[in-house]
Image (cartoon, grey):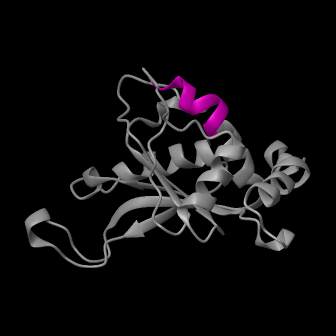
Amino acid sequence: MEKARLRELYVQEIRPQLQKKLALNNIMEVPKIEKIVLNVGVKEAIADSKAIQGVIESLAKITGQAPVRRLARKSIAGFKLREGMAIGAMVTLRGDRMYTMLDRLFSLALPKVRDFQGVKLGFDRRGNYNLGIKDWTIFPEMSYEAGEKTHGLNITIQTSAGNDAHGFELLKSFGMPFRK
């Protein structure tokens, strides 16, 4: 597997620029992206236990990695949900897969969104970013088929930044299309 383009860009250009811009003394203080977590909830899985299998296959296509089933922690009678039922799937990406996913997200998927004006600020006060996508067919690996149901997708980008300002600068330097 060849090195990810964004990893090389980070080491060669982004990290030294961020160190100067954020006035950090040590190169190890410069924020970096630690992992990306993709999460999908499948409410249809309560009535049809096979519904989650299509979601798992689709997530595997998008990320190139096998997803993990997420199980309900408690029973909720109003939702007909029992403890231990599979109700979602998630994937955690690190290393080259993480940088490849970021590259595809910024350069291929997000520009494919209809009337795209940029993404909103969604930081959690610790420098981590959350992004909700309503339709996962924006990824090039997914094709829209008539019978197939599309699902929303939550993407969490966890950084080593201590605050939102450093996290914002890090993602902006990677080319995240923030709304102006």
131 and 17: which is toward the camera: 17
Q: Does the image show residue 42?
A: yes
Q: Please, is residue 166 above or below residue 113 in the view?
A: below
The answer to whether residue 58 is magenta is no
The answer to whether residue 111 is magenta is yes
Q: Residue furthest front?
A: 23
Residue at image point 57% right, 59% down:
165
Instruction: Look at the magenta stretch and give its main secondary structure.
Output: helix
Q: Residue furthest left?
A: 78
**Residue 19: percent from the left, percent from the top?**
80, 60
**Residue 105: percent from the left, percent from the top?**
61, 39
**Quarter where residue 133 is shown:** top left
In the rendered view, does 16 fall on the left or right side of 110? Answer: right
150 and 103: which is toward the camera: 103
In magenta, the rendered stretch is 105-113
Residue at image point 42% right, 67% down:
70
**Quarter where residue 164 is shown:** bottom right
Residue at image point 31% right, 57% down:
49
**Residue 107: percent from the left, percent from the top?**
66, 31
125 and 25: which is toward the camera: 25
In the rendered view, does 8 fall on the left or right side of 43? Answer: right
Residue at image point 32% right, 76% down:
84
Q: Does the image show residue 1?
A: no
Number of callouts in the render? 0
In the rendered view, does 159 fall on the left or right side of 134? Answer: right
Q: Please, is residue 147 above or below residue 49 in the view?
A: above
**Residue 148: percent from the left, percent from the top?**
38, 32
